[in-house]
Image (cartoon, rainbow, N blue to C red):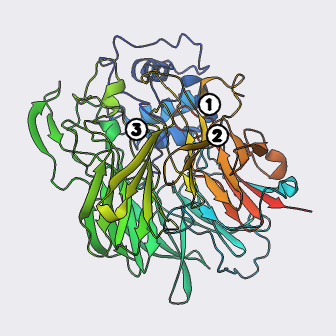
């Protein structure tokens, strides 16, 4: 099965007629290949979106950093319907023409351990997306504001053939579990970064593998971009079962699965938002939601859709005469939060794909943990129906509401205050942070707008808390100047009870030499420990801040070449999606995110307190 990589947004757009008014001629200025047929295909089908005018679409000048295999897999993946007018041979030739390199059959081998000592696990582990079931992204460690001068880069692991490193590591004892872009699950040695075992799966792991101890044995649970959930033996890497969740052909798994009490809670997202731009596609029929599986055998226990009713024909048709279906979309692409006291799980939802928008889009849902079903919901904004058709000059497929695409992408955070009250926090791409009362069916306690908002946030991937304050990163990258007002990127500290601003940290702009692929905004999830906050920017810089004042205590540039640490090409770039992982004396961060015009990279960096 193809390893589908959601990175080249609109790499092949239907046919030349759609872009007759926006086709940009290569004129030999971008690529040096002599394949005139592929050059013509590129000019007519690709360059209209990859000449700098389409949000999230990488500029054509960045394609040389991608492998031909990587581009080819995308043509068979998220852009498969858009590239359907091309033959298999044309797709291969186009991929080679764009990348400037031939298709390869073998990737370089990683550094396998010469000798494997027994894998040992520890009780003090960091084995899931949000560190705990409440998704606080806060943990105890030995790293604090007083010893940052001892925090040094210890080793670098380079993922072979990758241009993106977005699987957050899970750490326990002497082992690290992590996935890669090319459909592998790894167990790395914590001490030196060599590979203890590696196993092939069916798609990219875009989130954190989860380590769980069940009946005295350790297992790794993960989800991939093909809509599969896996259970592997943590000691040997043996695949114990694989469960396909392709109830819809465009299902993907972006958020990390959550494992609690022998149940796997799986957030359900899709890539159908991209198909909405295809006039030959009947848009749209996907419904997001959460599925509960048995951790023992993968059997489905229950399924809750984010839209309770199936999509149906609205009575309207697109320009090609295809039916328009609604309500649709409302994906869930964040890791669920578990509330034991109230027997609930919480997730945030995204936009509808077609109009009219569902009343659960851009919402926080509370779902019964035992039997499924929405118990209550909080909707932050109505009328947010959007798909990729809204970026096309013809407007083909764009919903009537043409919403801002302001999802709840960050996992919700649940905290208990000193007065025995609880607050549930949500962060949204609009730049808002929301505080809800879980004892009053999600009643809004306060909201605070700290960012302008944008397609990559606002608040994008994750916040953190120390129980008294809520810390949020703001991206505010404005791809096509759709959102008015000044950008306010940085890290913000808000009082958990009132939402009042404690402080703001604004990163320095270091992007002059890197162009539009670089941005100083903070889109990746934050993490915290002791008296510090760790944040990482789309420009590749990582920051450690004082949690009381926001003062900058330590910084490191990951947008660099690290080949001296490895036997293969190793380089960092944009830090996006996943956040820093803190474990004992170690701080781990992935760097490189060739997606939506960001800077590529392929490394996992391990920092350690060294004397």
Q: Nearer the viewer, mark 1 or mark 3?
A: 1
**Quarter in which the C terminus is drawn:** bottom right
Is residue 385 placed above or below 119 in the rendered structure?
A: above
Q: Position of residue 223 (x, y in %)?
A: 45, 62
Which badge, 1 or 3, comes first in the chain's sequence? 3
Q: Position of residue 350 (x, y in %)?
A: 35, 45
Residue lying farthest to the front in this orientation: 419
Which residue is pictured at 80% across the width and 52% down the height?
567
Q: Secondary structure at mark 1?
A: loop
The residue that disc 2 covers is 537
**Front-lying residue, 118 or 64:** 118
How busy is the neighbourhood of tag 3: few (under 14 within 10 Å), some, or many (20 plus)? some
Q: Residue 197, which numbered label? A: none
Which residue is pictured at 66% across the width and 76% down the height?
124
Residue lying farthest to the right in this orientation: 611
Q: Position of residue 606 (x, y in %)?
A: 75, 57
Q: Position of residue 259 (x, y in %)?
A: 45, 72
Q: Nearer the viewer, mark 2 or mark 3?
A: 2
Is residue 267 placed above or below 388 in the rendered structure?
A: below
Spatial CA span between label 1 and label 3: 36 Å
Q: Secondary structure at mark 3?
A: helix
Spatial CA span between label 1 and label 2: 8 Å
How busy is the neighbourhood of tag 2: few (under 14 within 10 Å), some, or many (20 plus)? many
Q: Residue 519, which numbered label? A: 1
Which residue is pictured at 59% across the width and 57% down the height?
168
Spatial CA span between label 2 and label 3: 38 Å
Which residue is pictured at 47% across the width and 56% down the height?
203
Residue 14 in view in this figure: no
**Front-lying residue, 479 or 346:** 346
Whether the residues at callouts 1 and 2 have beta carbons within 8 Å, the answer is yes
The residue that disc 3 covers is 88
């Amino acid at each position: 099965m193809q390893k589908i990589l959601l990175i080249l947004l609109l790499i092949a757009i239907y046919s030349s007629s759609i872009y007759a008014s926006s086709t940009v001629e290569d004129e030999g200025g971008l690529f040096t290949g002599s394949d005139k047929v592929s050059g013509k295909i590129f000019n007519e089908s690709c360059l209209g979106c990859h000449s700098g005018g389409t949000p999230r679409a990488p500029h054509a000048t960045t394609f040389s950093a991608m492998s031909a295999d990587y581009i080819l897999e995308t043509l068979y993946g998220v852009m498969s319907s858009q590239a359907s007018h091309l033959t298999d041979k044309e797709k291969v030739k186009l991929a080679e023409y764009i990348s400037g390199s031939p298709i390869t059959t073998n990737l370089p081998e990683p550094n396998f351990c010469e000798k494997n000592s027994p894998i040992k696990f520890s009780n003090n582990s960091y084995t899931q997306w949000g560190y705990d079931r409440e998704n606080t992204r806060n943990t105890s460690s030995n790293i604090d504001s007083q010893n940052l001068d001892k925090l040094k880069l210890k080793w670098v692991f380079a993922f072979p053939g990758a241009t993106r490193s977005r699987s957050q590591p899970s750490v326990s004892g002497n082992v690290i579990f992590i996935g890669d872009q090319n459909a592998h699950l790894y167990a790395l040695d914590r001490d030196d970064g060599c590979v203890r075992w590696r196993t092939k799966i069916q798609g990219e792991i875009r989130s954190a593998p989860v380590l769980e101890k069940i009946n005295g044995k350790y297992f790794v649970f993960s989800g991939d971009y093909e809509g599969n959930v896996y259970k592997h033996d943590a000691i040997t890497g043996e695949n114990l079962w694989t469960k396909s969740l392709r109830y819809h052909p465009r299902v993907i798994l972006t958020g990390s699965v959550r494992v609690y009490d022998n149940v796997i809670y799986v957030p359900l997202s899709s890539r159908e938002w991209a198909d909405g731009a295809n006039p030959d596609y009947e848009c749209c029929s996907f419904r997001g939601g959460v599925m509960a599986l048995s951790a023992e055998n993968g059997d489905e226990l229950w399924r809750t859709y984010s839209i309770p009713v199936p999509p149906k024909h609205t009575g309207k048709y697109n320009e090609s005469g295809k039916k328009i279906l609604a309500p649709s979309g409302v994906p869930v692409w964040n890791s669920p939060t578990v509330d034991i006291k109230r027997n609930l799980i919480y997730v945030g939802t995204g936009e509808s794909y077609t109009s009219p928008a569902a009343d659960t889009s851009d919402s926080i849902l509370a779902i019964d943990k035992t039997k499924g079903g929405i118990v209550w919901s909080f909707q932050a904004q109505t009328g947010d129906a959007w798909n990729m058709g809204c970026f096309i000059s013809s407007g083909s497929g764009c919903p009537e509401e043409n919403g801002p695409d302001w999802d709840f992408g960050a996992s919700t955070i649940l905290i208990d205050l000193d007065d025995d009250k609880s607050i549930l926090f949500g962060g949204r791409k609009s730049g808002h942070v929301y505080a809800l009362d879980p004892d009053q069916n999600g009643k809004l306690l306060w909201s605070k707008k700290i960012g302008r908002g944008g397609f990559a946030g606002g608040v994008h991937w994750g916040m953190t808390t120390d129980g008294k304050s809520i810390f949020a990163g703001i991206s505010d990258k404005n791809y096509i100047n759709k959102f008015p007002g000044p950008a306010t990127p940085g890290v913000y500290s808000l009082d958990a009870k009132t939402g009042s601003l404690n402080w703001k940290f604004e990163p320095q702009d270091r992007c002059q030499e890197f162009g539009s692929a670089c941005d100083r905004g903070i889109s990746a999830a934050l993490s915290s420990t002791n008296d510090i906050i760790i944040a990482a920017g789309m420009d590749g810089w990582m920051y450690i801040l004082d949690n009381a004042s926001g003062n900058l205590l330590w910084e490191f540039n990951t947008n660099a070449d690290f080949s001296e640490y490895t036997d293969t090409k190793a380089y960092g770039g944009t830090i996006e999606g996943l956040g820093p992982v803190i474990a004992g004396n170690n701080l781990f961060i992935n760097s490189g995110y060739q997606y939506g015009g960001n800077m590529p990279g392929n490394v996992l960096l391990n920092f350690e307190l060294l004397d």
